[in-house]
Image (spheres, rainbow, N blue to C red):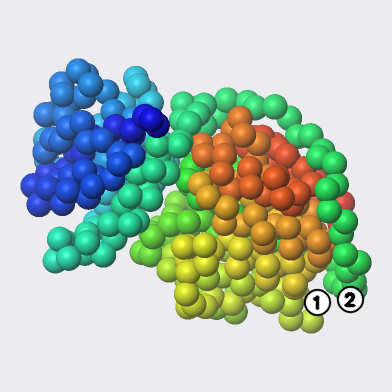
Amino acid sequence: MTERTRIFIIDDSALVRQFMAEIIQTQPDLLLVGMAADPVMALPKMQNDWPDVILLDIEMPRMDGLTFLRQIMSTRPTPVVICSSLTEKGASLTLEALSAGAVAVFAKAKLGVRQHLEQIAAALLHALREAARAKNLAMVRRGTSAPAMRIEPVLTAARPFRLDQTTDRLVALGTSTGGTQALELVLGSLPANAPGIVVVQHMPEKFTAAFADRLNQISAIEVREARNGDRIVDGLALIAPGGLHLQVHRNGAHYSVEVIDAPPVNRHKPSVDVLFRSVAQAAGRNALGVIMTGMGDDGARGLLAMREAGASTLAQNAESCVVFGMPKEAIRMGAAQHIASLQDIPRAIMAFAAAGG
């Protein structure tokens, strides 16, 4: 019998704790080992029976979730799922928590909490299972080096692909669990003259604008949430808005983005596959596709489409992923020409840009 994932809930709302407990207890692969109204009450209980995953409210009295998270990550790194309110303050705190080591987030409403939680029960369970597969938390936070890039053999032949005379190059990044920290490292390491970048990070609606602002503050390039019609230019990274898809189109010798409201793809919105497939069609050999840490397979087929269209393609290696899901599937399908550690991805991006100069 497969061992069950042990969950501990920390939330100051008795209603939220009760509902989450009910949902978890219906799942044969999950085991609720304890609950508490705040971290001060939780820690003694957890010391006796340490969980595999902590479900943590971010805004609580006595000790807030962010302070507790930092303590946990410095002493006993454990996968943490953040439960956050859909407010500006909640979004800001959640991004700090993701930067501090939390691996997933789901949003709860202030009003009609139980009805809202019923609607997002599936998302909650997905986040818990995602967190259970997370690894290398301390390594990713501390930036520990991983093996250098290596070239994979070509497993699928690329179709002939021809573009007009444009030399504009663009980079498409796709990531999920662990991606907030990974993107901080990658975008924060790039020089101001980096090629134009488009990004899909699986993240709830209302959070991506604050996430883009945070990345912009630590990066030499400009980073912002994508707007419909934005042109992709050197020194700019555009982040797909939560709850919408992002596509790339060719306009003469230039590229621009389209932000669209359409059904989820691979259960995600934005979807990495949607972005990558549009880049394959619009940019072909003028593009680099990078698939990074994340659970599931979103982006793997899109990366294969990019490779078949003549693009350069790269997957993050297992050693530096928080969850080696999306890159693993891309490698299995033969979509990735290269495999690189997280720390090597910025160099790979700039090498790609230099090759087109």
- Quick one: quadrant of the N terminus? top left
- Quick one: quadrant of the C terminus? bottom right
User: Would you call the spot at circle 2 few (<14 residues within 10 Å), some (14-19), or many (20 or more)?
Assistant: few
Amino acid marked by disc 2: Asp
Image spot of residue 159 (x, y percent): 88, 64
Horizontal arrangement in the rendering, residue 321 relative to residue 153 (left or right):
left
Tell me which residue sits at (81%, 40%) in the image.
152
Direction front: furthest residue: 1
User: Would you call the spot at circle 1 few (<14 residues within 10 Å), some (14-19), or many (20 or more)?
Assistant: few
The disc placed on residue 167 is: none
The span from disc 1 to disc 2 (Cα, nearest Å) is 8 Å
Instruction: Give the camera-side residue of 3 and 207.
Output: 3
Q: Which residue is mark 2?
A: 164
Tell me which residue sits at (36%, 64%) in the image.
206
Classify mark 1: helix, strand or loop: loop
- Tell me, yes or no, if residue 41 can be seen here: yes
Amino acid marked by disc 1: Ala
Please report contact status of discs 1 and 2: CB closer than 8 Å, yes or no.
yes
Instruction: Give the camera-side residue of 229 and 152.
Output: 152
Tell me which residue sits at (67%, 59%) in the image.
301
Classify mark 2: helix, strand or loop: loop
Q: Which residue is mark 1?
A: 253
Image spot of residue 163 (x, y percent): 87, 73
Image spot of residue 165 (x, y percent): 90, 73
Q: Is residue 147 above or below residue 83?
A: above
Image spot of residue 18 (x, y percent): 12, 48
Direction left: furthest residue: 14
Instruction: Give the camera-side residue of 115 and 168.
Output: 115
